[in-house]
Amino acid sequence: MKLHWSPLSPYVRKVMIVLHETGQLGDVDCVRSVVGLADTPNPAVLADNPLAKIPTLITDDGLNLFDSRVICEYLDARGNGGLFPAEGTARHKALRWQSLGDGVTDILLLWRTELTRPTGPWHAITDGWLVKVRASMAQLEAEAGELREAQFGIGHISIICALGQMDFRWPDCDWRAHFPTLATLNQDWLVRPSISLTRAPADQPQDSHVTEGNLYYS
Ligand SMILES: N[C@@H](CCC(=O)N[C@@H](CS)C(=O)NCC(=O)O)C(=O)O
């Protein structure tokens, strides 16, 4: 299989965690694919995905799969991983947590793009994002106990990737002081090699950190 990949993409990280967890890392050729919302669509990615987004997976049967939700579910089934509960309440809870984690990641990525807009960010939008991210974090803090009890799966993976993106781009926001139960849980998840080995490289240039107009909690 071929995966359009980047070490910095939180959605690609979801796929990499699933590959680790299901023992399929050796089955995938990771191709470094650079994309950006404000950049010309990458022709190599566009050839495999008309939306020109990563992750995009080409299966051994030549099927081009996107987005991360579809790819993760495909790989989980292929590797008998059990990361997607088959049915019932457990499945809906896992998919709901995936939606919440991915939703926070969606906002964080769009926010960063908004901050690079030459005319400055549209504050009517960023003000709303601040409310939504804070409300999502409060929801996760309230559900941290339930998350700890639930079987590790796609919901946890999506939340971990959202928190990782927050740490990577907003390293000074100090979310741990405001959401301590979630912070402990996030720390405990690091014992899994799939989580610790897929973190975004810490040695990024300083300008990759958002230092203004951001989501400081205090
Ligand atoms: N919902 C998609 C989002 C994928 C996505 O937006 N990926 C970013 C990279 S982190 C991307 O490809 N951005 C380029 C673009 O949107 O043109 C998923 O879960 O895979």
Image (spheres, rainbow, N blue to C red):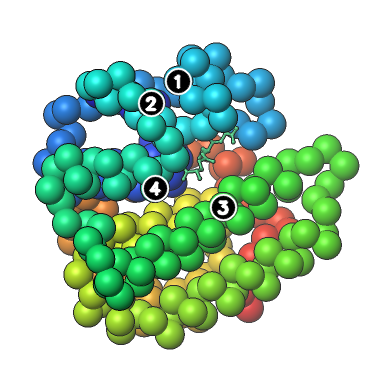
Please state the horizontal and vertical placement of residue 28, each as a whole percent of the image: 23, 27
Q: Please, what secondary structure does the residue beneath circle 2 have? A: strand
Residue at mark 4: 69
Q: Are marks 1 and 2 in contact (CB under 8 Å)?
A: yes
* Sequence order check, earlier mark of 3 and 2: 2
Residue in the image at 55% along x and 24% along y: 50
Q: Nearer the viewer, mark 4 or mark 3?
A: 4
| Residue 180 in sight in this render | no
* Residue drawn at x 59%, y 48% as measured from the top left: 109
Question: Residue 156 in the image: x percent, y percent?
Answer: 32, 64
Whichever of labels 3 and 1 marks the residue nearer the N terminus, that label is 1
Residue under numbered circle 2:
64
Quadrant holding the N terminus: top left
Q: Secondary structure at mark 3?
A: helix
What residue does disc 3 label?
A: 106
Q: Pick out the residue farthest to the right.
A: 119
How far apart are labels 4 and 3 at the CA level? 13 Å
Front residue of 197/171: it is 197
- Cβ atoms at labels 1 and 4 below 8 Å apart: no
Can residue 178 be spotted in the picture?
yes
Based on the displayed image, in which of its 4 quarters is residue 140 positioned?
bottom left
Q: Amino acid at mark 3?
A: Asp
Type of amino acid at the residue the image marks with label 1: Asp
- Identify whether 149 is placed above or below 189: below
Assess mark 4: CB under 8 A from ligand 1?
yes
